[in-house]
Image (cartoon, rainbow, N blue to C red):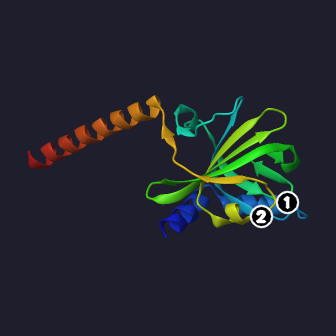
Amino acid sequence: MLDTFYRVLTNLIYLVPLAVRRFKAKEPGSQVLAAGATKARRLDEDSAEIQYEAGWITARRGALILTQDKLVCGSWQILLSNISHATLLRTTAFLARALVLKVSTTDGQHYQFGLQYDPAWENQTALRLSITDGKIKYSKFSVAMRVILGIALVVWLIRLVVRWLG
């Protein structure tokens, strides 16, 4: 249930229905098999581990669209015929299921797409992928940022209580 709420919310925030309509108008012969809000990264080398790290701060945000022959995310168009390996990691984030799609192409590009859970990605048959269950690891940067933000939140709450009592 929380999975569906997060998916609907992020799809609205990232304007996914509008992106799909625009895509269909531009390419009426293409069938959209799956689409969802994504944070996406293009990497020069394959990262064995998926982790929360600084690179996600500047990640591309938008709609990821899968058709019979390609993945589309903004100006990125990745032909399925050029994909050498794809993995869909099923994980949890914020008490709900989530997905990370990792794609490697024959020309040496590597992509990671963070998605809200949507069974359409697991059930589609156009993109050959392996599906695995796992966890997203935390980089040192990510842990440090969480500690700093946690301390800042506690200090802010203490100041708020002191003002309220004083």
Name the residue carrying label 2: 33
Place of residue 102 in the rendered image (x, y in percent of width and height, measured from the top left): 68, 45
Residue at the (82%, 63%) spot, across then down: 24
Q: CA distance from mark 1 to mark 2?
A: 7 Å
| Label 1: few (<14), some (14–19) or many (≥20) C-alpha neighbours in 10 Å | some
Q: Which mark is residue 2?
A: none
Residue 75 visible? The answer is no
Quadrant of image for the C terminus: top left
Please say if the residues under marks 1 and 2 sit with CB atoms less than 8 Å apart. yes
| Label 2: few (<14), some (14–19) or many (≥20) C-alpha neighbours in 10 Å | some
Place of residue 99 in the rendered image (x, y in percent of width and height, measured from the top left): 60, 54
From the viewer's side, name the closer residue of 166 and 122.
Answer: 122
The secondary element bearing badge 2 is classed as loop
Q: Earlier in the sequence, mark 1 or mark 2?
A: 2
The secondary element bearing badge 1 is classed as loop
Residue projecting furthest to the right = 29
Q: Amino acid at mark 2?
A: Leu
Residue at the (73%, 58%) spot, across then down: 19
Place of residue 34 in the rendered image (x, y in percent of width and height, measured from the top left): 73, 62
Name the residue carrying label 1: 68
Residue 12 visible? The answer is yes
Place of residue 112 in the rendered image (x, y in percent of width and height, measured from the top left): 66, 42
Q: Is residue 40 left or right of residue 21?
A: left
Q: Is residue 28 left or right of residue 121?
A: right
Q: Is residue 109 left or right of residue 52?
A: right
Q: Amino acid at mark 1?
A: Gln
Q: In the rendered picture of this protein, how many numbered marks are placed on residues?
A: 2
